[in-house]
Image (cartoon, rainbow, N blue to C red):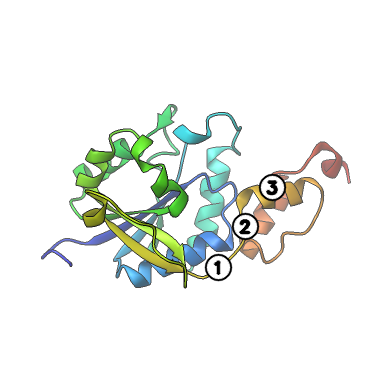
Amino acid sequence: MRRAGRRRVGILGGSFDPVHLGHLILAEAALEHLRLDRLLLMPAGRPAHKRRRALAPAEDRVAMLRLAARSNPRLEVSTLEAGGAGVTFTVRTLEALAAAEPADYFFLMGEDSLREFGTWREPGRILELARLAVARREGTPRAPLRGALRRHVVFVPMPGIELSSSAIRRRVARGASVRYWVPDAVLTYMDRHGLYRSRRTRRT
């Protein structure tokens, strides 16, 4: 329920390495289902759960997101996490957002992340700052919720689309097409900057 005078703001974080059409479909589903005023697309700098893998430079991931989001005025790219040098934690991000703009915040995540939520830094504080908006495939049963999660979780129905950034990186590395996996402007950017190509494909 909307509180008087407060905007409804969603947060979709992730590596976005690269952003793909699945991300945008989730963003649109969240905007519609949660009746959001705007949705922040927030690329991570060094996410706590992905410390071992080298990411594409933050400026490239931010640039691709801006290209992908430019046609939707309710999508906004935030560099709050990408601009930091250290490891990023959701609780600190939410505290910074709430201090800058009091709003009703919805933090989007997958059901796999919901199952691991208890291992995140200060999960109780996260629930004070935002509701968890959990994407689930249409027609699948909702994950069982216990305790405080029952009051702080809302499910966002999603079509079953099998797209992942890791699959896109693998295809690009071996020279396979990812047309229609990512927005055209993002594909052009990746080609122009040689992102995700292996040494072999860079030479061809």
Q: Secondary structure at mark 2?
A: helix
**Which residue is nearer to you in this view: 159 or 178?**
159
Q: Marks 2 and 3: in contact by CB < 8 Å?
A: no
Tell me, for residue 130, which label it has, or none.
none
Question: Picture coordinates of residue 77 (x, y %)?
Answer: 42, 53
The crowding category of the residue bearing disc 1, from other C-alpha atoms within 10 Å (few below 14, some 14 to 19, many at least 20), is few
In the rendered image, the residue lying farthest to the right is 204
Foreground: disc 3 or disc 2: 3
At a point 82% along the width and 42% down the height, the residue shown is 202
Q: Residue furthest top?
A: 86
Q: Residue furthest left?
A: 4
The residue sitting at 61% across, 50% down in the picture is 165
Which amino acid, mark 3? Arg
Q: Name the residue nearer the viewer: 125 or 92.
A: 125
* Residue shown at the point (59%, 37%) measured from the top left: 55
Q: Give the crowd class for mark 2: few <14, some 14-19, many >=20 residues within 10 Å.
A: many
Which badge, 3 or 1, is on the more N-terminal residue?
Answer: 1
SS under mark 3 = helix
The CA span between labels 3 and 1 is 21 Å
What residue type is disc 2 on? Val
For the question of whether residue 72 can be seen, the reply is no
Is 80 drawn above or below residue 139 in the view shown? above
Labels 3 and 2: the sequence-earlier one:
3
Can you see residue 8? yes
What is the number of the mark on residue 169?
3
Q: Nearer the viewer, mark 3 or mark 1?
A: 1
For disc 2, the marked residue is 186
